[in-house]
């Protein structure tokens, strides 16, 4: 009686089909000139025996390893994991495995991992992170193609995929205007972050096009609930008639919502609230649940992976930065102003 846990060998398939090992290999790999009857007999024997080809061995024979590396500086995985899942969806169709390496924002550690990945003969590398600021290229003249996702290379020779932060800010503005809000404030993250600046630019630009001024200046602070509470307090003191707040992140929005409730402002009846990120535990945890902008990180990962596959196949995308549109996720913190 055969052991179901033991892998069936190609020799057993060849014996069952009455052919040589070489003929069986050609039949299963679709190579060589064989009679259709022979190829069908080998295939039937392989299926009957439950033969599973050794993908790694096949790849090595063809000069391939069917692996890519994903290098990230996002230790918490807040952004890199959705990017990786999107990448795996695209890579999975080609049966390519992903090695994920966390650099912890340490350049020396990053270089070490890149060397390790190249030693493992990965066929390409995706670099990702939690900030969209241009970052140094991981190297020129590498033996494999490299694509950047949710971060961008400072080198004009590289291909990068990032979210459309200005477009997201503009989308928030148009949504709030459509709900009848005209006194809109903005509480966001540190001004040193490109994402915070670009989201603010998108918001103010769309408001200006509609002839609606922003309530005061954008309030830059930290990516935290505590800053959201403080920022809302500052905004309400300076502009007590504010009827909407767009926040640079869902964490900030959750803090803003707490201060609004403490001040007796109903959401969304008195003040509509929009966040950014669509971080579901945070957005769903708001009371009421938070309308927010989704950066479509999975789509960013998918596009980056497809670009990497194209490059591996000899058809690299033109260098530059590709932006992926954000999506508005509607929840209860915004609705048409009854007034």
Image: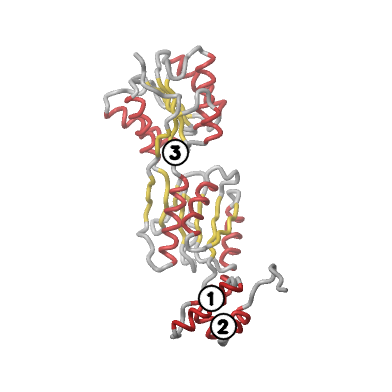
Q: Are marks 2 and 1 in contact (CB under 8 Å)?
A: yes
The residue under label 2 is: 17
Residue 294: mark in rendering: 3
Mark 2 surroundings within 10 Å by alpha-carbon count, few (fewer than 14), some (14 through 19), many (20 or more) = many
**Which one is earlier in the sequence, the residue at label 2 or at label 3?**
2
Q: What is the count of numbered marks?
A: 3
Q: CA distance from mark 2 to mark 3?
A: 55 Å
Q: Which secondary structure lies at badge 2? A: helix
- Label 3: state its secondary structure: strand
- Quadrant of res 268: top left
Between the C-alphas of marks 1 and 3, the distance is: 49 Å
Residue at the spot 56% in from the left edge and 70% down from the top edge: 55
Q: Nearer the viewer, mark 1 or mark 3?
A: 1
- The picture places residue 119, in percent across and down from the top left corner, at 59, 68
- Residue 117 location in percent, x, y? 58, 63
Residue at numbered disc 1: 44
Quarter of the rendering occupied by the N terminus: bottom right
Q: Nearer the viewer, mark 2 or mark 3?
A: 2
**Residue at screen point 39% across, 36% down:** 168
CB under 8 Å between callouts 2 and 3?
Answer: no
User: Which numbered circle lies on residue 69?
Assistant: none
């Amino acid at each position: 009686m055969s052991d179901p846990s033991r892998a069936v060998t190609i020799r057993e398939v060849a014996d069952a089909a009455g052919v040589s090992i070489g003929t069986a290999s050609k039949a299963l790999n679709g190579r060589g000139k064989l009679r259709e009857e022979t190829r069908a007999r080998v295939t039937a024997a392989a299926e009957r025996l439950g033969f599973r080809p050794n993908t790694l061995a096949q790849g090595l024979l063809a000069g391939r390893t069917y692996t890519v590396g994903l290098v990230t500086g996002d230790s918490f995985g807040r952004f890199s994991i959705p990017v990786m899942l999107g990448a795996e969806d695209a890579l999975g169709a080609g049966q390519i495995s992903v090695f994920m390496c966390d650099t912890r924002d340490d350049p020396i550690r990053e270089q070490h991992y890149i060397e390790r990945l190249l030693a493992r003969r990965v066929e390409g590398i995706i670099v990702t992170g939690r900030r969209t600021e241009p970052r140094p290229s991981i190297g020129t003249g590498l033996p494999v193609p490299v694509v950047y996702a949710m971060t961008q290379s400072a080198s004009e020779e590289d291909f990068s995929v990032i979210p459309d932060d200005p477009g997201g800010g503009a989308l928030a503005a148009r949504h709030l205007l459509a709900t009848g809000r005209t006194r809109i404030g903005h509480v966001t993250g540190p001004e040193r972050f490109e994402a915070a600046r670009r989201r603010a630019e998108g918001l103010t630009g769309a408001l200006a096009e509609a002839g609606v001024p922003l309530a005061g200046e954008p309030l830059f602070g930290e990516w935290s609930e505590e800053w959201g509470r403080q920022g809302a307090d500052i905004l309400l003191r300076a502009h007590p008639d504010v009827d909407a707040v767009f926040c640079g992140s869902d964490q900030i929005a959750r803090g803003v919502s707490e201060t609004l409730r403490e001040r007796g402002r109903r959401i969304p009846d008195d003040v509509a609230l929009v966040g950014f990120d669509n971080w579901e535990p945070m957005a769903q945890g708001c009371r009421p649940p938070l309308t927010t902008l989704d950066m479509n990180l999975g789509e960013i990962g998918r596009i980056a992976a497809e670009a990497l596959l194209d490059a591996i196949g000899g058809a690299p995308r033109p260098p530059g930065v590709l932006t992926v549109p954000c999506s508005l996720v509607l929840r209860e913190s915004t609705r048409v102003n009854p007034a």
